[in-house]
Image (spheres, rainbow, N blue to C red):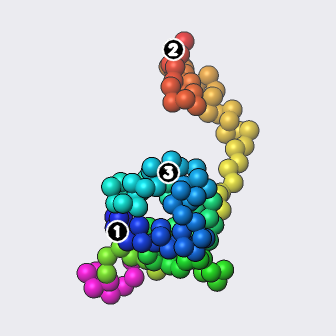
Amino acid sequence: MVNIDDFVKRLEIILDYYGLNASAFADRIGVQRSSMSHLLSGRNKPSLDFVMKILEVFPDVDLYWILNGKGNFPKSDEEVSPEVAKPTPILSNEIYGGEDLFSTINYKEEPKPEIKISSEIKSSNFSSEESEIEKIVFFYKNGTFKIYTP
């Protein structure tokens, strides 16, 4: 959960860094000036839309830094982006006896096996000599189906 007082302090750091007052900052990110005023006074909490607008207009702001103070402002080019960062366990290793919960996960996609159906198998499955057709079911992409009974 975001600590509102700390979030406001980080927001004020951004304002100082870019040399903007609250009104100019609100205009730049496309929010109402009153929204910015209410946020800075602690009356309102920041919405996801508000945070995303900050990140869109000011690319030097790090998401994790503005939300919880972790990371750097302004972003450094040497940082590893969250998409490629190693996952960290939510709970400490002491609870589970020492082994990292995420160390053995491999995200490599397995090659899909090639499926080949010979013409002999096709014809033998649908041969009317062996059995009589009881029903035919049509499955549609929208999740519906129809049953045809000859």
Name the residue rendered at 58%, 66% in the picture. 20
User: Which of the image's four quarters has the N terminus?
Assistant: bottom left
Residue type pointed to by label 1: Asp
Check the image and report above or below for 76 versus 3: below
Q: Is residue 41 visible?
A: yes
Depth check, mark 3 against mark 1: the one in front is 3
Q: Would you say the residues marked 1 and 2 are in contact, meaning their CB atoms lie under 8 Å apart?
A: no
Q: Residues within 10 Å of mark 2 (few under 14, many from 20)?
A: few
Q: Residues within 10 Å of mark 1 (few under 14, many from 20)?
A: some
Secondary structure under the numbered disc 3 in the rendered image:
helix
Secondary structure under the numbered disc 2 in the rendered image:
loop
Q: Nearer the viewer, residue 79 or 18?
A: 18
Task: Decide if residue 18 is on the left or right side of residue 114.
Answer: left
Residue 42 is inside the magenta segment: no
Where is residue 12 drawn, in percent x and y? 47, 70
Which residue is tagged 1?
5
Residue 95 is inside the magenta segment: yes
Which residue is tagged 2?
149
Check the image and report above or below for 102 versus 112: below
Query: Which region shows up in magenta?
Result: 93-102
Which residue is tagged 3?
33
Name the residue rendered at 43%, 75% in the picture. 69
Task: Decide if residue 43 is on the left or right side of residue 36.
Answer: left
Residue type pointed to by label 3: Arg
**Farthest right residue in view:** 119
- Circle nearer the N terminus (3, 2): 3
Secondary structure under the numbered disc 1 in the rendered image:
helix
Q: Nearer the viewer, residue 1 or 99?
A: 1
**Predominant secondary structure in magenta?**
loop
